[in-house]
Image (spheres, helix red, strand yellow):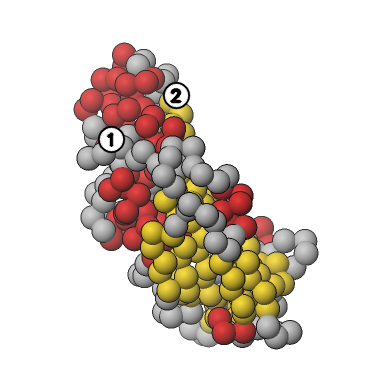
Amino acid sequence: MTVLNHKIDFVLLASVEKANPNGDPLNGNRPRQNFDGFGEISDVAIKRKIRNRLIDMKKKVFVQSNDKNVDGFKSLKDRADAVEELKQLAKDKDESGYAKVAAQEWIDVRSFGQVFAFSGQSLSVGVRGPVSIHTGVSVNPIDINSMQITKSVNSVTGPSKGSDTMGTKHRVDYGLYVIKGSINTQLAENTGFTIEDAEDIKEALRTLFENDASSARPEGSMAVEKLYWWEHETKMGQYPSVKVHRSVSIHSLVDNPRQLSDYEIVLEDLPGLKITELIDG
């Protein structure tokens, strides 16, 4: 496998229809929204979805959620300690060796990085990964609708029917979110991130919302509409990432967009830099 030797930038457009793309637990699980009213999807949530897709692709992932646990380990420490070489390196307090082996073992570690700091272990190791992802932001301010829901069944057996329990569900009627990211070659060299790993990340992005359905995000309510993927010819890149990301401009054609065709998407040509793959959802 060849370590990635050229910079990569990407922009993903994701549509949300009558769903909660990323609830804020500090705000009653309402869809995340900045002070200007634009919707947000945290980079942590995006990375979680990428990890889930990598697990579906049978890749070894270190940070597994409970509903995607495929190896039976109940904590990150248990998963790390199951690798005998890592246990020995922790005893030897070999930080660089520990980081190298951990990156070789798990694709999310060599992609996003990871902090290995566990109770009872004197060694603390930080790994910086080459894949960086921005917070997703909607093109327009979002409208959030709230719906009252009721639970009218008993949770446990009792002498009489329990009182109804009220709750609230929140959703975005429609929003188009822009997610930007890059892959840095210098950090790829440090973690051993390969060209094959980059292809796996691309595939995970292309299928980001597969197997991601829930009551807050019904099947088909979130979709990858477009994925722009630039591969530079050099390690540093022919253009800075900000210029590449800004080469995609999106404008509303109507006052209240409700579908992708309500937007004009313009892609600026950057001389010498070609899009190697343009995925249209």
Q: Nearer the viewer, residue 237 or 149?
A: 237
Q: Secondary structure at mark 1?
A: helix
The image quarter in which residue 175 lies: bottom right
Q: On the picture, is 34 further left or further right than 263?
A: right
Q: Nearer the viewer, residue 120 or 199?
A: 199
Using a 10 Å C-alpha cutoff, classify the residue at mark 2 as few (fewer than 14 neighbours), some (14 to 19) or many (20 or more). Answer: some
Q: Earlier in the sequence, mark 2 or mark 1?
A: 1
Q: Which residue is mark 2?
A: 124
User: At x 26% / y 20%, what residue is drawn?
Assistant: 88
Give x and y (percent) for residue 205: 41, 61
Give x and y (percent) for residue 39: 66, 67
Q: Which residue is mark 1?
A: 104
Numbered-mark total = 2
The image quarter in which residue 27 lies: bottom right
User: In this orientation, does residue 128 appear?
Assistant: yes
Using a 10 Å C-alpha cutoff, classify the residue at mark 1 as few (fewer than 14 neighbours), some (14 to 19) or many (20 or more). Answer: some
Q: Which kind of residue does numbered mark 1 sit on?
A: Gln
User: At x 29% / y 29%, what residue is drawn?
Assistant: 101
- What is the quadrant of the C terminus in the image? bottom left
Question: Going by the picture, which residue comes out furthest to the front?
Answer: 271
* C-alpha gap between disc 2 and disc 1: 18 Å
Give x and y (percent) for residue 31: 63, 68
Q: Nearer the viewer, residue 2 or 144?
A: 2
Establish if 188 lies above or below 52. above
User: At x 31% / y 37%, what residue is drawn?
Assistant: 3
Question: Going by the picture, which residue comes out furthest to the right?
Answer: 36
